[in-house]
Amino acid sequence: MASAQELTGTLVDPLDFPLASPPPGAVQNLANPESRAYQIYAISAVFLALTISFLLIRLYAKLYIQRSRTWDDSVISYTGVIITVVSEPGGAKHLWDTTIGDFSDKGFIEELVVVALYGPVIFLVKLALFLLYLHLFGRLRWLRWLVWLGILVTGCFYVSGPIVVFTLCAPSPGDSWLGMSFKSKCRNGLQDYGFAQGTMNLVSDFYLLVVPIPAVLALQLPKKKKIGVIAIFMTGFLACIVSTVALGLRITYNKTADITWNVITLYIMTIVEMNVGLMVACMPSIATVFRHHADSIGSFLGRISSKLRSLSSRRDSASYSRRGGGGGGGAAEKNRFSPESSVGGGGSSSSSSSSRPRSSRTYVELRDMNTAVDRSLAPAAVA
């Protein structure tokens, strides 16, 4: 194939050469190439807004409703700050629209820093959940052992990330950072380490999902409240789904040819993975806020429902009147749908299920666990 210089008769800067030739059916466009950068900016903006909202709600719940703070609050706050820094996109063009000049030592170093920070950030998210479990169920010895085991294993793996990344890709004397990006030691090493990270993410997410369930089932709580607590912790299943998808994308990415284009999907899932993990850690506080304002929310929704039913009743009554019907049905329909007729019917059901039989476990442990759960999930702290 003739070079660009032979075709044009002019000198061409080597930095303007594309990294690959376009495949059959694809058109090369170096002047105005198609880019997926907007996708990362959009996803980053959406999840950044969601994450900040969740963090603010958690802060409100801790400072103004429960009036208490624990170690997991500090961890989550620091993690939220780091995520806003890490969620920054890189290149996003097809490989045949990407030139050598698009790469530089500075750009590659910035990319390595982001990759290196990914592990510690994920660990902080998981650490916040482990600390929450210690706070809620720390009276159970077996659970303490499982939590500390999880902290030890995930901490050693994720915190070692920066060491692994820069060991693989730091240049030897006489080499450049950019030159290392094209060497198999760095490129293949990062792919293998990325697969290992995806596997650890999936395993640790399921671990975090399963560990608290026996402790929740042992709580002396009304059945309805116990189901609600389990539902809060089961939101971690969303993190398991995201980790599964991300691991699949890592495997697919290792087999793709258009790496500069397809890696954007992996970047997006990485952003989603970090932010979803942080939002899951905030779910107990979200539940606290909703329970604290349950009356206000219920009253607001009740007024809206009442107005909608009133409009529907008037519409039905007018239609019936036009057909020559009687006038008593409208009043009966209105009374049937009035807010007063629906108040007070189900209020006593929860009180009947409030008996708390003692289990065979130590009463003191269960009492303290119930108190800890109430402090973290209930609208007001228990004395």
Image (cartoon, rainbow, N blue to C red):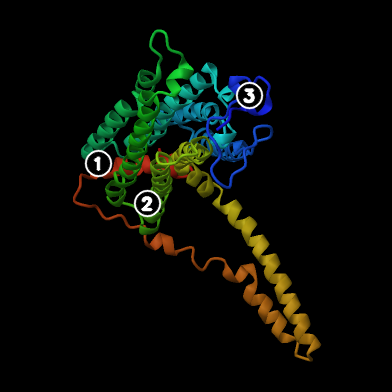
For marks 3 and 2, give the CA distance: 67 Å
Q: Which quadrant is the N terminus positioned in?
A: top right
User: Could you say which is closer to the camera, residue 286 or residue 339?
Assistant: 286
Q: Amino acid at mark 2?
A: Ile
Q: Which quadrant is the C terminus positioned in?
A: top left
Can residue 131 be seen in the rendering of this structure? no
Q: Marks 3 and 2: CB-CB under 8 Å?
A: no
Q: Nearer the viewer, mark 3 or mark 2?
A: 3
Q: Looking at the rendered structure, which numbered label has been put on residue 5?
A: 3
Disc 3, SS: helix
Sequence order check: which comes first, mark 1 or mark 3?
3
Q: Position of residue 227 (x, y in %)?
A: 38, 56
Name the side, left or right, on which 91 lies relative to 284.
right
Residue ID for mark 1: 364
Q: Marks 1 and 3: CB-CB under 8 Å?
A: no
Residue at the left extreme of this rendering: 360
Q: Residue at x 41, y 60 (%)?
A: 351
Q: Position of residue 246 (x, y in %)?
A: 42, 43
User: Could you say which is closer to the camera, residue 328 or residue 376?
Assistant: 376
